[in-house]
Each structure stands twice: as C-alpha cells, then as structure tokens.
C-alpha cells in the first residue's frame, strides 16, 4: 500500500524539521549563530490517467487525469542570514558586524574559516585570536603594553602603546563577503568554510560599498526567534502525528482485508 | 453471486487510492507552495447482456472508478520569514522556473542566489524574469522585490519576476519538486508578489484527517460486507451441497 510509504516520508521530513528547530533553539544564545530552516518538495507523481489523453475519436480529451504523489523530501536546510541583534559587552576586543560580511579566521588545517562571531581575545604572543585561539586574518599583533585599544567602524585597530600620548596604528581588520552566503558550509565552532556554491570570498574593508561595518564592544546575538521556532515546532509535531495517523489508518484497512477470511 | 464481491472490491481499490492521496497531502503539510489534491469518483455502469424475458429483468451493475484528480488551488497561508529572497504569491499566478526539461511553474518562492549570482530555487533551477534568468553582481545589496514583481537593487529597477496565470489551471500536471508543467501561461494580472514571506501548503489537516477516517471506516464496512458474502456462499454450499446418501 502506497499510503504507508508516503506517510513514512512525511514522518521523516517532519522529524528532520524538528531536528533543525532543536538545533536552532539550542543555539539561541550562541554569538553570531544564523538559524536554519527545513525546506521540502513533493516527490514524483505516478500518472494513472494522463491529463489530455484522448477519450474518443471525436477528439475529446481527459480534462483532469489521475496523478498520485509519493510523498515529500527535504530539499535544503538553508540558513537565514539576517542580521541578529547586538548586545553590549563593553569588552574592547568584542566586535559585532552590522550588515554584510564575515570575519576571516585562519584554521589549524590551513583553510580559511569565516565567522560572524566577533568575540576575540589576545593570545600569549599578542595576536588577535578567536575564542578557540585561531588567528584572525590578516593578523594583528597587539603589544603587551598597549592599552585603550580602539577598533573603528572601518576596522582600523589603534592603541596607546606604553606611555605614548598618540595612538599607534596596529592594523586593519578586513571582512569577506560571498555572492551566495547561504551556500557556505558550516563546520561547527561558529565557523563556515567556502564551497563551490558560495563562490569565492571577496575580501574588503568594512564600510566599503556592499560591506558591513564593525561595532566595538558589542556582540551579534543569534537571529533565532523563540516564538517562531516554537510555533514551527508545534506545526512540525502535529504534522508528524497526522502522518502517523495515516499509517495506522492504512494498517487498519489492510488488517480488515486480511480478516475477511478467517 | 459474485457481483457483490466484485463491486465491493472496486470500491475498496478506489478507497485505497483515495488514502494514497490523503497520505501525499499530509506528507506535504509543511511543504512550501504545495497544492493539495482530491480524487473524483465516477459510477461505471457495467454493460451487461440484458435479457428482459424474465419476470425480473437483469439489474445493471455499477462499479466505482476514479476518474481524475482535482488540484486545490486555494491560497495557502502566508507566513513572514524576513528573508529577502523569500517571495509569496497572492492570487492565482505561478513563478516560472527553468528546469532541464523546459519551463516549469511553481508556487514555492523560497529562492537563493547561486555561485554565479543567478536567482535559483533551492534545488538550483534558475528563476525566470521578464528578461530571462536574473543575475546579481557580487556588490549587489538591498535586493527589493515590489508587489508587481519588479526587482530592484539599491533602488534601481533591474528586472521583473515572471509570474504567469493559467486560464485552465486544472490542466496543469504535477511533476514533483514543487513544480507544475503545462501550457497556456499568460502574464499575470491579478497576482501580487510579497517579499519576505512564504506561502505554506494549502492542505487543511483537519479536513484530510476526517476524510481519512471516512475512508478507513468505509473500507472496513465493505470488508464486512465481503466477509458476509463469503459466509453466505460457504453456507449455501454446505446446505445445498449435502447429499443424503
């Protein structure tokens, strides 16, 4: 019976939907997290009686045919790359991105990672690093005796070194953007890597046309909205239940057939 | 004697098919832009060799036949997502998508931009504008889509989403992947485009579930009927077939 399999695809799809929502809710307070969404498509249709087939020699045709669908499949779990809210932290190395762009991070395996999480630190050598200790590109070294570090909206890093009365330029934080940022691959740790579908990274200075700006002392919250997630979850849960009901309905029908002959 | 069985069977086959439809509708309860379907039945009169010289003429037998599927083109619920490339249609129109087999039509407006900057569906099929495929440059930000489908980048009109309407939408055929195929699409006049929103499936869960209950119960009733028929026959054979030796 086809209905059994069709309902099974429905249950699997809703299960995946709940998994995606669970991950969104789990990352509700993760800095720079972008929520995902499960998108579905219907599966192939079986044409039992084709629309437009001739019904007589006089040229009459079938106005509506019989087409039975075979369920649903998950086509993508795109990330919703909208801006998250910003919260003040008053730490001088916390950066929030407003608008387009990703910070570039040097991964231990030599690749470049991209992140919206701007909670940076100084390591033992004074390098600007992420919370995991990965160097933020293009590489900014802050001297040990530097104080009052300022990072401008355009990414220029300045600090008063030692007893200097004028600030010293320490470097420039640059950001990358992509033609198709939803095509980036997530590798965990708030990091993304570029893929064939994201296109190559285009590195630029914050504030340039098409690039966002930086905000020192703030962090970008996740863009997960609890209300949306919960209502999506209820919808997925109920849809799951209904598909389960179809399975038991089909089961009842089969068992009543089996019981004709006792 | 077997007529009751065979007619009952024709109904059961039809009911199973109807359950297949309900299952597909419910499986796609959360599929963006999905259009529900229902099945239409027809009475099929068995052409019997009629003999009217008996006192009781032959009765006509009518079977059940599923004659067609009816697409439900009601508007689905529109939910706001806030994503700039999510577009919902209000009205009877369809977006035009370039599939490998040719132009296809869809109500699912969750689009994305691929690595070449082309506006595509989530499985990578280009979405058509009035001037062919819609391509964005790497520096294009603030993509806005107006109510009539006009796409503008940074306040400058770029292209317009092609939206078509069909005089006879029932003739459209579903090909899976949220797509329809068909002919006779004319530029839409009564359809509006909404940016930052998606149209959900138009399947109403309550209606489907109650239809399902009806289907399963009817099926059971007919099963009982068939069982009774079989009983009757076996009793008849038992009673009439006993010979007193």
Image: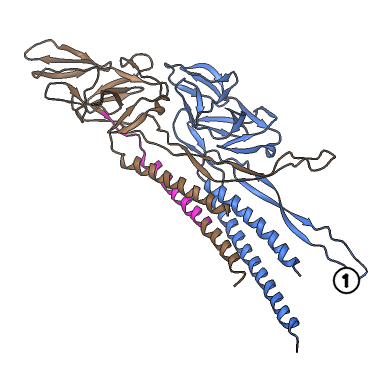
Chain colours: A brown, B blue
Which residues, given as a range, are shown in magenta? A219-246
**Residue located farthest toward the top when viewing the structure as drawn:** A166
From the top left corner, tell me how far across and down residue A18 is, in percent: 40, 46
Task: Locate residue B234, reporting x and y percent.
Answer: 69, 76
- Answer left or right for A255 relative to B185: left
Q: Is residue A86 above or below residue B228?
A: above
Give the image location of residue A10, x and y in percent.
50, 48
Find out whether residue A245 is within the magenta segment. Answer: yes
Q: Quadrant of residue A24?
A: top left
Magenta segment, principal secondary structure?
A: helix
Q: Is residue A5 magenta?
A: no
Q: Residue furthest right?
A: B53
Residue B170 sits in quarter: top right
Which residue is situated farthest in the front direction here? B245
In this view, the residue in front, B192 or A36, is A36
Q: Which residue is mark 1?
A: B56
**How many numbered markers are drawn?**
1
Note whether B52 is above or below A64 in the view shown: below
In the picture, measured across the screen, residue A199 lies left or right of residue B200, that is: left
Q: Is A97 displayed left or right of B158 in the figure?
A: left
Please state if B49 lies on the left or on the right of B165 as rendered: right
Q: Which SS class for mark 1?
A: loop
Image quadrant for the N terminus of chain B?
bottom right
Query: Which residue is most to the left?
Result: A163
Q: Quadrant of the C terminus of chain B?
A: bottom right
Is the residue marked by circle 1 packed among few (<14), some (14-19), or many (20+) residues within 10 Å?
few
Chain for numbered disc 1: B
- Residue B217: horizontal and vertical position, in percent? 60, 63
Residue drawn 14% across and 12% down? A167
At a point 42% along the width and 47% down the height, the residue shown is: A15
């Amino acid at each position: 019976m086809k209905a059994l399999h069709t309902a099974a695809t429905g249950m699997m799809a809703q299960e995946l939907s709940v998994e995606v929502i669970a991950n969104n809710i789990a990352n509700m307070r993760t800095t720079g997290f972008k929520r995902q969404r499960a998108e579905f498509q219907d599966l192939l249709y079986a044409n039992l009686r084709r629309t437009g087939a001739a019904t007589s020699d006089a040229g009459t045709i079938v106005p509506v045919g019989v087409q039975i669908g075979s369920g649903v499949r998950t086509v993508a779990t795109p990330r919703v790359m909208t801006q998250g809210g910003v919260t003040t932290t008053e730490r001088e190395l916390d950066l929030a991105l407003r608008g387009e762009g990703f910070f570039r991070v040097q991964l231990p395996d030599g690749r470049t990672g991209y992140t919206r999480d701007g909670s940076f630190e100084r390591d033992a050598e004074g390098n600007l690093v992420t919370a995991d200790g990965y160097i933020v590109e293009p590489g900014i070294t802050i001297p040990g005796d530097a104080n009052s570090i300022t990072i401008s909206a355009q990414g220029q890093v300045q600090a008063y070194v030692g007893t200097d009365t004028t600030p010293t330029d320490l470097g420039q934080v640059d950001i990358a953007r992509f033609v198709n940022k939803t095509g980036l691959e997530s590798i965990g740790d708030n990091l993304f890597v570029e893929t064939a579908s994201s296109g190559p990274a285009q590195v630029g200075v914050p504030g340039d046309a098409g690039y966002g700006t930086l905000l020192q002392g703030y962090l970008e919250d996740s863009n997960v909205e609890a209300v949306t997630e919960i209502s999506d979850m209820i919808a997925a849960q109920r849809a799951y239940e209904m598909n389960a009901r179809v399975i038991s309905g089909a089961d009842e029908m089969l068992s009543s057939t089996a019981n004709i002959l006792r | 004697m077997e007529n009751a069985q065979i007619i009952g069977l024709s109904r059961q086959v039809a009911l199973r098919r109807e359950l297949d439809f309900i299952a597909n509708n419910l499986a796609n309860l959360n599929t963006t832009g999905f259009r529900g379907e229902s099945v239409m039945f027809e009475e099929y009169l068995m052409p019997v060799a009629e003999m009217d010289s008996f006192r009781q003429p032959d009765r006509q037998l009518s079977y059940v036949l599923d004659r067609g599927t009816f697409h439900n083109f009601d508007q689905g619920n529109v939910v706001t997502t806030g994503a700039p490339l999510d577009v919902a249609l209000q009205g009877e129109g369809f977006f035009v998508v370039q599939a490998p087999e040719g132009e296809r039509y869809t109500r699912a407006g969750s689009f994305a931009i691929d690595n070449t900057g082309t506006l595509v569906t989530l499985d990578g099929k280009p979405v058509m504008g009035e001037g062919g495929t819609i391509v964005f440059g790497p520096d294009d930000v603030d993509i806005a889509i107006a109510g009539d489908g006009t796409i503008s980048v940074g306040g400058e009109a770029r292209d317009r989403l092609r939206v078509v309407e069909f005089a006879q939408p029932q003739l459209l055929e579903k090909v899976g992947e949220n797509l329809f195929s068909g002919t006779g699409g004319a530029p839409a006049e009564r359809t509006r485009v909404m940016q930052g929103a998606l149209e959900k499936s138009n399947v109403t869960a309550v209606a489907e579930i109650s239809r399902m209950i009806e289907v399963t119960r009817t099926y059971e009733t007919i099963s009982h009927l068939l069982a009774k028929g079989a009983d009757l026959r076996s009793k008849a054979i038992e009673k009439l077939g006993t010979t007193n030796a």
